Image (spheres, rainbow, N blue to C red):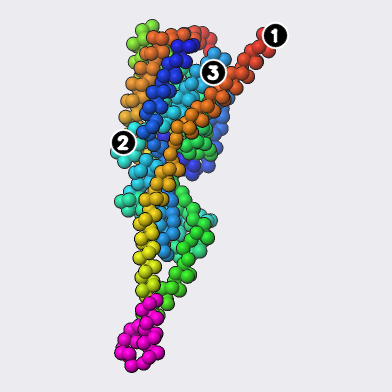
């Protein structure tokens, strides 16, 4: 028995050596809002992304809202039209299924976004009209100034959003990878549980045997 | 290899759970006291082995080592592998708690099958022959597991042939690696601790 235990321990140690470079093979999917659209990423926890994969979008009750396909980086974007819970489902084959939910409060502000678009449109119209009037009226000039600053603000916001998105993407990826990390302590903890559980089995079996003897 | 939550239909999950519970009960009944430490060690080995990944193309597969567990434990592989799977699901998020029964069945049933198919071979007089049978057992258990995964997916509505094919082909390297690993393990055990299979011979020869 002693020799077998030694053998088993050696085998375990050997496998530990390989563990350090191993990664979990798990599907990770995340969704987040970006402006008026919901963007998401689907991939495996070892860093491979799900390329050209169909993502189906459902509401909270399972009614299909639409579908999108991921690009070469496992990235997809979906423009929500209703204020409902969005559930994104994707089947990566071989029993790998990704499912992420986006709650209503996380949804991009659809109504607000459309109203902003209208104001911008309105502002642009007034801008054009003010140019036609060609500065003859002081009021029109003021309106044109306001319109330009509004348009600039909107442009800035778009730019800022894009910039933040670019900055945050690697961070988000790192967090996703960190969540999937199996550190040494977890592995040791799991083995500890196994040892304890089988120790308990052993104790119960031994007690039963002792009771039989007596 | 681990099927995740939500990939299977409810019927398959329930049927798998029921069968797995039956297997675990039978395994615990057939687990003699002397084999409990071996079951624990193999459970831990299985738990760790699934963290060893073999990168293949766009995806990667991991070792399972259910053949080895089956050869040494027989029906007791069911509780041993179940414990390993449970902890993997809890700690690493492999598979999931609802599909635990199906995963246990998919991994432990081939182990038991290999036990019945290869136990005479592994108990052969020559350690070399035993090692070859061990290798066959190690590879065969993976083949059977891929087929069972394919069947579970097929019963849940996926096309059987493409699903099974995908799982099968990505696991060919694992079959080779596990075959070799199991062969070496069996060879080593036969050399350093032949008693481990001595009772295998007795139990297989005796009334069972």
Badge 1 vs badge 2, beta-carbon distance below 8 Å: no
**Residue A42, how many percent across, how many down?**
39, 49
**Residue A76, how many percent across, how many down?**
37, 55
Is A151 or A89 nearer to us in this picture?
A151
Q: How far apart are marks 2 and 3 (CA)?
A: 35 Å
**Residue A58, how many percent across, how many down?**
47, 56
Kindly state the secondary structure of the residue where label 3 is placed.
helix
Q: Give the range drawn in magenta.
A: A127-150
Q: Is residue B194 visible?
A: yes
Tell me: residue A22, above or below residue A55: above
From the image, give the main secondary structure of the stretch colored magenta. Answer: helix
Q: In which quarter of the image is the N terminus of chain B?
A: top left
Q: Is residue B160 visible?
A: no
The residue at 56%/15% (across/down) is B32
Q: Which chain carries label 1?
A: A
| Image quadrant where residue A130 sits | bottom left
Q: How far apart are marks 1 and 2 (CA)?
A: 58 Å
Q: Earlier in the sequence, mark 2 or mark 3?
A: 3
The residue at 38%/53% (across/down) is A169
Q: Mark 2 lies on which chain?
A: B
- How crowded pointer 1 is (Cα within 10 Å; few <14, some 14-19, many 20+) is rated as few
Tell me: residue B1, above or below residue B34: below
Read off the residue under disc 3: B36
Is A148 or B174 nearer to us in this picture?
A148
From the viewer's perspective, is B10 left or right of B145?
Answer: right
Q: Distance between the residues labelled 3 and 1?
A: 22 Å
Name the outermost residue toward the bottom: A136
The residue at 38%/32% (across/down) is A20
Read off the residue under disc 2: B56
Read off the residue under disc 1: A214
Q: Are marks 2 and 3 on the same chain?
A: yes
């Amino acid at each position: 028995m002693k020799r077998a235990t030694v053998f088993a321990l050696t085998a375990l140690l050997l496998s530990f050596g390989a563990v350090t470079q191993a990664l979990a093979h798990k599907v990770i999917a995340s969704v987040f809002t970006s402006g008026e659209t919901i963007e998401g990423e689907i991939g495996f926890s070892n860093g491979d992304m799900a390329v050209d994969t169909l993502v189906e979008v459902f509401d909270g009750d399972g009614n299909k809202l639409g579908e999108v396909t991921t690009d070469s980086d496992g990235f997809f974007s979906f423009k929500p039209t209703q204020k409902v819970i969005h559930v994104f489902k994707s089947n990566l084959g071989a029993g790998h299924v990704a499912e992420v939910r986006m709650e209503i409060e996380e949804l991009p502000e659809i109504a607000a976004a459309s109203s902003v678009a209208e104001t911008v449109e309105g502002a642009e119209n007034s801008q054009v009209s003010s140019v036609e009037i060609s500065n003859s009226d002081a009021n029109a000039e003021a309106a044109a100034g306001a319109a330009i600053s509004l348009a600039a603000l909107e442009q800035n916001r778009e730019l800022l959003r894009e910039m933040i998105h670019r900055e945050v993407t690697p961070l988000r990826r790192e967090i996703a990878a960190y969540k999937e990390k199996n550190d040494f302590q977890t592995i040791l903890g799991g083995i500890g549980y196994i040892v304890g559980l089988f120790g308990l089995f052993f104790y119960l079996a031994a007690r039963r045997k002792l009771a039989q003897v007596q | 290899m681990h099927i995740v939550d939500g990939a299977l239909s409810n019927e398959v999950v329930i049927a798998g759970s029921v069968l797995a519970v039956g297997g675990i009960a039978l395994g615990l009944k057939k687990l003699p006291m002397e084999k409990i430490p071996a079951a624990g060690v193999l459970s831990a080995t299985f738990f760790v082995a699934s963290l060893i990944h073999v990168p293949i193309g766009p995806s990667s597969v991991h070792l399972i080592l259910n053949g080895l567990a089956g050869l040494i434990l027989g029906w007791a592989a069911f509780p041993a592998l179940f414990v390993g799977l449970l902890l993997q699901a809890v700690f690493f998020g492999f598979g999931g708690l609802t599909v635990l029964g199906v995963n246990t069945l998919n991994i432990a049933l081939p182990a038991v099958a290999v036990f019945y198919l290869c136990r005479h071979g592994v108990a052969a007089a020559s350690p070399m022959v035993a090692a070859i049978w061990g290798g066959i057992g190690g590879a065969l258990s993976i083949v059977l597991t891929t087929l069972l995964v394919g069947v579970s997916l097929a019963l849940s509505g996926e096309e059987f042939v493409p699903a099974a094919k995908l799982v099968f082909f990505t696991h060919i390297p694992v079959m080779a690696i596990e075959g070799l690993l199991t062969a070496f393990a069996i060879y080593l055990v036969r050399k350093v601790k032949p008693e481990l299979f001595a009772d295998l011979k007795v139990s297989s020869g005796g009334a069972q």
